[in-house]
Image: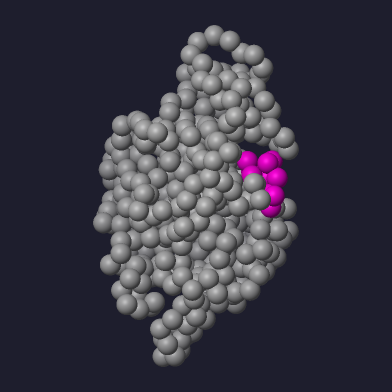
Amino acid sequence: MILKGGKIALPGREEFFEGDIRIEGGKIAEIGENLDGGEKVDCSGLMIFPGGIDAHTHFDDPGYTHREDFLSASSAAAAGGITTIIDMPCTSVPPVTNLENLRTKLEVVRRKSVVDFGFYGGVSAQSFEENFPQNVRELAPYVFGFKTYFISGMRTFARLDHWQFRQVLRETIKLGVPVLVHAEDFDYVNSATQFQKSRGDSPREYYLSRPEVAELLAVGAVADILRDVLTETGLPSGFKPVHIVHISYYRSVDKLMGLPITCETCPHYLEFNLDDFVRIGSPLKVTPPVKSGDNPQKLWRYLAVGKIDFVASDHAPAPYEEKYTGSVWTDYSGIPGVGTLFPYLLSEGFFRGRISLRRFVEIASAAPAKRYKIPSKGAIAPGYDADLVLVDPSLTWKVEGKKFFSRGKITPFEGYEFRGRIVRAFVRGKVVYDFQRGIVVPPGYGEFLTPCR
């Protein structure tokens, strides 16, 4: 197959290359001009990007499939230009804290996914009741990192205290596997929540229960603990042992400068602030909450210059009855995001001039692939998987939650108009999503990925 005459987003380029892509055996075989031979697909007027990688999802399968499952969520991913996802260990039953639990999850979801997928392992407080070092060693070849929480609302996946986190780092550094951290300070949030609940039941009270300082305290603790551990273990060349998930406050990033720590943010932190939360209400309830003032604009600036490594969705939808309980304190915290991640970054980032073409490709594809050593993903280059997204830049489209493939229909982006219609998405050279026909591969087409270490 040859994709003919498209504007191709090649790695490291600030301008599109107008030419052709030859696909053979699911791989990119050649990039050039006037290529010939075999089936041809006319891409005139279309932009061709590497498939997006969403490195932070909660697909809730198995165990919470009333909220989401791997078929509905991976379909939403494909329709949104995401061709690879990495799913979190904590929102499935049982949580992926040992090899047996990983195999249980894989047996269920591998029959459902229409995009390629991988898993994170996890270490919770419960892991310390088992032989967590052995579990980590056994999981390491199969997972892209280990998720931890400094504060957790999940009974099946309790938070780590600082001493426990230090022990986890000592083990994972030996293995060369990164630790991912949900960074909000437990003591601050616990006390503030009790106080703010007594004051009211609004988005503002919820925000005040876990404001900017809660993240700053936690990120600072991560940095200090890592410095301490490295005096004992040293650091393998080029390895960055920690990744902070869903950074919500720009000043938190400053605490990471000069340290072997990476971080991500999410579209909702780039777009919304506290005033929007007050206006929109629970469809924008996420954890950490969106922050105040001009924080979104500052996050965009940090993202543009590489202080923030990439953007992930933190996809975590819920049905109406869980999202609208009558109280902000019990409304489910999480939104569907895998289907709007790539379109948002393209429309509100690249097309609006906030980020360059080169940086868009890094943020959406190359940086998460590099961070987690995802094999053959993240770039349009010979030898890479033919994971490609074809976009018509002349078209706009309106976000309507009721049309999502995801089971989650409640989105804070409802009614937004994005520039750039995704026409087709390819995974390993095969069309998985077509704008006119929808999902065009059977459940289970997606392959299980493991890291290339």
Image quarter for residue 274?
Answer: bottom right
Q: Considering depth in this image, is 260 or 418 the residue closer to the camera?
A: 418
Q: Is residue 69 visible?
A: yes
In the rendered image of this protein, does residue 196 appear above or below residue 407? Answer: below
Q: Which quadrant is the C terminus positioned in?
A: top right
Residue 93 vs residue 365: left or right? left
The percent coordinates of residue 426 (x first, y second) are 47, 30
Give x and y (percent) for residue 144.
49, 46
Q: Nearer the viewer, residue 160 or 373?
A: 373
The residue positioned 52% from the left and 34% from the top of the image is 389
Q: Does the magenta stretch include residue 317?
A: no
- Residue 361 vs 283, above or below: the answer is above
From the top left corner, tell me how far across and down residue 158 is, in percent.
39, 67
Question: Dividing the picture into quarters, in which one does residue 157 lie?
Answer: bottom left
> Which color scheme did the rendering employ for the protein?
one colour
Q: Give the range drawn in magenta.
A: 353-362
Residue 98: x and y in percent read 36, 51
Tag count in the figure?
0
80 or 73, which lies in front? 80
Could you tell me if residue 116 is visible in this image? Answer: no
Q: Residue at x 38, y 60 (%)?
A: 410
Question: Can you say whether 381 is above or below 396 in the image?
Answer: above
- Name the residue: 28% across, 46% down: 104
Residue 360 is one of the magenta-drawn residues:
yes
Lateral position of residue 359 relative to residue 412, left or right = right
> Of helix, strand and loop, which mostly describes the magenta segment?
helix
Identify the residue at horizontal 30%, vertical 64% (top origin).
320
